[in-house]
Amino acid sequence: MVTSLDPHSRYMNDKAWSEMQETTHGEFGGLGIEVTMEDGVIKVVAPMDDTPAARAGIRSGDLITHINGEAVEGLTLEQAVNKMKGPVNTTTRLKIIRTGAEPPIEVSIQREIIRVRPVRYRAEGGDIGYVRISAFNEQTTDGLKKAIADISKQIPPEKLAGYVVDLRNNPGGLLDQAVSVSAAFMARGEVVSTRGRSPEETSGTPRGAAISPRASRSSS
């Protein structure tokens, strides 16, 4: 049944559901790396900011072929991810194939408790607010509110030209958080909607209260 769906759909048992809840909550144990399965190997979607994986130089697009000396070929995505998890202060060894790099890269990464900080920000050039959103978890909307409030203190409203919202390497996450963030930069209209075969299957999520009426520019 699941194989007939798109590559991003999969069946989740209780354990997988619990692991996803940990991720969307924004705190879990591991290396701090978002991965997917591609052609029998693990492909890095993105290393999370300020995590062991990011500090070790893991890059988006890296292909992980071995974990602790064991080939990942034949493993499911869940099995491979579980092999990268473990007690804090223990080490995971990865063998990586990277485009343009020969031979394969081998790296040892020490596990930590990963506390995802999804929003980082700064004032740029005296009139631009830069906001990086690295994931949509339960802390994202509150982080964005804080970012805009702090930037507003640094840049007077009359000088604020707009915001640059950096979504590069953002692997996604909770839909309600993505809707809330989008609503902050939209003056009006529907953010996301579904269309079903019958009226009761059709729903829409309208734009919520804007965080700042001047937050009108974004980039991805």
Image: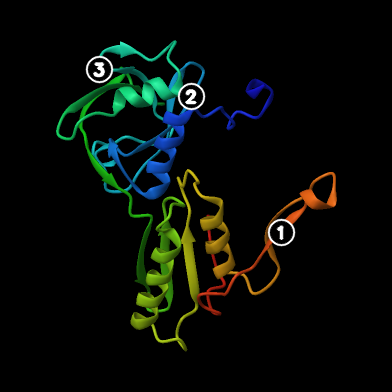
Type of residue at label 1?
Gly
| Quarter-of-image position of residue 90 | top left
Residue 216 tag number: none
Mark 1 is surrounded, within 10 Å at the Cα level, by few (under 14), some (14 to 19) or many (20 or more) other residues, namely: few
Residue shown at 56%/79% (left/top)?
213
For the residues labelled 1 and 3, the Cα–Cα distance comes to: 46 Å
In the rendered view, would you say 100 is above or below 162? above
The extreme bottom residue here reads 158
| Quarter-of-image position of residue 76 | top left
In the rendered view, would you say 30 is above or below 24? above
Nearest to the eye among marks 1 and 3: give it: 1
Residue shown at 40%/87% (left/top)?
156
Which element type, helix, strand or loop, lies under badge 2?
strand
Give yes or no for contact between labels 3 and 2 (Cβ–Cβ under 8 Å).
Answer: no
Residue at the spot of label 3: 68
Type of residue at label 3?
Asn
Residue 37 tag number: 2
- The disc, 3 or 2, on the residue closer to the chain's N-terminal end is 2
- The disc, 1 or 3, on the residue closer to the chain's N-terminal end is 3
For the residues labelled 2 and 1, the Cα–Cα distance comes to: 32 Å
Residue shown at 68%/73% (left/top)?
188
Type of residue at label 2?
Met
Q: Percent from the top left, x then y, of residue 19?
A: 40, 35
Q: Percent from the top left, x then y, of residue 103?
A: 30, 17
Which element type, helix, strand or loop, lies under badge 1?
strand
| Viewer-nearest residue: 24 or 41 | 24
Q: Percent from the top left, x then y, of residue 212?
A: 51, 78
Mark 3 is surrounded, within 10 Å at the Cα level, by few (under 14), some (14 to 19) or many (20 or more) other residues, namely: some
Residue at the spot of label 1: 204
Residue shown at 46%/52% (left/top)?
136
